[in-house]
Image (spheres, grey):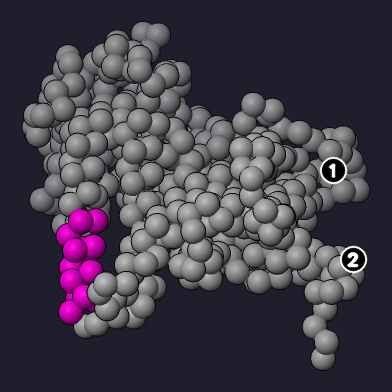
């Protein structure tokens, strides 16, 4: 070998070149794929919202279905006052569009609720008004989130979907399965705290709680906590909202 | 899956000597990464609750391992000795990130399924172990065979453990395309008035260790050469 590959100079040079090269490759890859990834995320979000009101949808054909069912996108502040409302096509570049509020980012930022806006999706399905509320919270290992659809009485749960990032397969990860989500249907959000709860697997449930997952206690509790906390904020809006919608 | 890949590689590289072919077959038994070298135990515990996830993880490891082994093998003459571990780590991490980003953009559904595993691949000791022990001192061809062999050796243990754990822990195997495959009639279950109850302990991580232990026991009972002398 012509050069001494173990000299200090070469070692430093190698490390510097490697870091710059790898950094450049990864950064350019990330930048060039970002638009596609954003579009995929938005699509997934629409699918989840539609899933909460029980409308099946597939990737690639979501936007038209979304436009058909979701009539209004509303944002409210922590006191339940309406901030903004939009309808029609979703504009991914408009930061004022309630659809573009990143509730997960808001949750992570730990900013006080008074500084945040909360999105709400008003839907119409089979002549029935439904309201989809995004929820975010903490599981055992990482973030969990979901969408809860309320019926026009703003009290009864019409449907719910949940998802997670890194919960334990076979235990906490089961929150995205039907057997966990189906019992939410027909349950109610209590007007007084605690608004909703997920109880330990097998324990008796009430009108305001569902059964958790055995062995997935912390994730189940996380689901209960996020629904309870989020509903606390939205209830203020629901109670002040014009009752004409009823 | 495993036989397909193995035969394809052997056919294409039939020029390879018997010694090189051993690179493919050895890790399946005599030098199995999990049961003999005891590498990659961590991921064997974490993702053997369901067969489906064991399959995904095995494929991901296969891919990253081939990529990592070949790249490090190509660079083996220019990597400074003192920072070789860091270089290996950078190669593995970059590969994993590239795969993750591309999947997120072009195949979001698969990306969602893989999300948990991405971190686990980077920390998988088998990959680092093979880069350090083999790729650094061998040409890309053998390095690739070594990667395939070890990934397969990893895969079959993972699948075996996952099979045991899912069957006894959940009572059925769910696999995309096949729905749920049940092994016992519903009426046998305690909840339906029967006598059988799924063993929840099987789902918890310690049982993965016990299952791997049983596999090691069986393997050593059959293959005496693996037993240490003292």
- Residue A12: say if magenta: yes
Q: Nearer the viewer, mark 2 or mark 1?
A: 2
What residue is rendered at 69% in x and 59% in y? B19
Callout 1: SS:
loop
Q: What is the crowding at mark 1: few (fewer than 14 residues within 10 Å), some, or many (at least 20)? A: some
What residue is rendered at 68% in x and 29% in y? B179
- Residue A203: x and y in percent read 63, 53
- Dominant secondary structure of the residues highlighted in magenta in the image: helix
- Residue B169: x and y in percent read 74, 52
- Residue B211: say if magenta: no
> In the rendered structure, which segment of residues is drawn in magenta?
A9-22
Front-lying residue, A122 or A106: A106
Residue position marked by numbered label 2 in the rendering: B222
Callout 2: SS:
helix
Q: Is residue B24 above or below residue B215?
A: above
Observer able to see residue B45:
no
Residue B189 numbered tag = 1
- Measure the alpha-carbon separation of dots 2 and 1: 36 Å
Q: Which residue is outermost to the front?
A: A2
Horizontal side of A193 relative to A70 (left or right) equals right
Front-lying residue, B112 or B130: B130
Q: How many marks?
A: 2
Q: Is residue A225 above or below residue A210?
A: below
What residue is rendered at 40% in x and 31% in y? B107
Horizontal side of A246 relative to A240 (left or right) equals right
């Amino acid at each position: 070998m012509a050069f001494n590959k173990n000299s200090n100079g070469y070692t430093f040079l190698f490390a510097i070149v490697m870091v710059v090269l790898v950094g450049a490759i990864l950064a350019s890859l990330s930048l060039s794929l970002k638009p596609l990834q954003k579009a995929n995320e938005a699509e997934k979000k629409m699918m989840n919202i539609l899933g909460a009101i029980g409308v099946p949808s597939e990737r690639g054909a979501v936007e038209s279905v979304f436009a058909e069912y979701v009539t209004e996108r509303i944002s409210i502040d922590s006191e339940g006052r309406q901030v903004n409302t939009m309808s029609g096509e979703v504009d991914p570049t408009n930061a004022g569009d309630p659809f573009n509020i990143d509730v997960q980012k808001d949750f992570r930022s730990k900013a006080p609720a008074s500084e945040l806006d909360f999105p709400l999706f008003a839907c119409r399905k089979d002549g029935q008004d439904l309201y989809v509320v995004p929820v975010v919270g903490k599981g055992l290992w990482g973030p969990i989130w979901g969408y809860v659809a309320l019926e026009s009485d703003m009290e009864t749960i019409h449907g719910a979907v949940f998802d997670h990032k890194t919960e334990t397969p076979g235990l906490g990860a089961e929150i995205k399965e039907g057997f966990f989500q189906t019992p939410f249907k027909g349950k109610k959000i209590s007007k007084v705290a605690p608004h909703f709860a997920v109880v330990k697997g097998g324990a008796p449930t009430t009108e305001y709680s569902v059964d958790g997952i055995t062995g997935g206690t912390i994730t189940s509790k996380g689901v209960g906590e996020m629904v309870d906390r989020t509903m606390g904020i939205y209830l203020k809006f629901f109670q002040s909202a014009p009752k004409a919608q009823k | 899956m495993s036989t397909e890949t193995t035969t394809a590689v052997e056919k294409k590289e039939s020029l390879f000597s018997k010694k090189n072919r051993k690179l493919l077959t050895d890790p399946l038994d005599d030098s199995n990464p999990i049961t003999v070298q005891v590498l990659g135990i961590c991921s064997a515990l974490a993702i053997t609750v369901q067969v489906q996830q064991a399959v995904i993880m095995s494929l991901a490891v296969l891919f990253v391992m081939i990529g990592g082994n070949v790249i490090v093998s190509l660079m083996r003459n220019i990597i400074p000795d003192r920072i070789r571990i860091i270089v290996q780590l950078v190669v593995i991490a970059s590969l994993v990130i590239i795969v993750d980003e591309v999947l997120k953009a072009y195949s979001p559904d698969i990306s969602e399924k893989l999300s948990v595993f991405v971190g686990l691949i980077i920390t998988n000791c088998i990959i680092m172990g093979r880069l350090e022990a083999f790729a650094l001192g061998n040409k890309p061809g053998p390095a690739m065979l070594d990667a395939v062999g070890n990934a397969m050796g990893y895969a079959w243990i993972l699948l075996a453990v996952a099979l045991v754990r899912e069957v006894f822990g959940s009572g059925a195997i769910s696999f995309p395309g096949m729905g749920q495959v049940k092994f016992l009639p519903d009426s046998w279950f305690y909840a339906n008035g029967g006598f059988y109850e799924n063993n929840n302990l099987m789902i918890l991580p310690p049982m993965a260790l016990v299952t791997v232990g049983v596999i090691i026991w069986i393997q050593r009972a059959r293959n005496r050469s693996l037993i240490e002398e003292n």
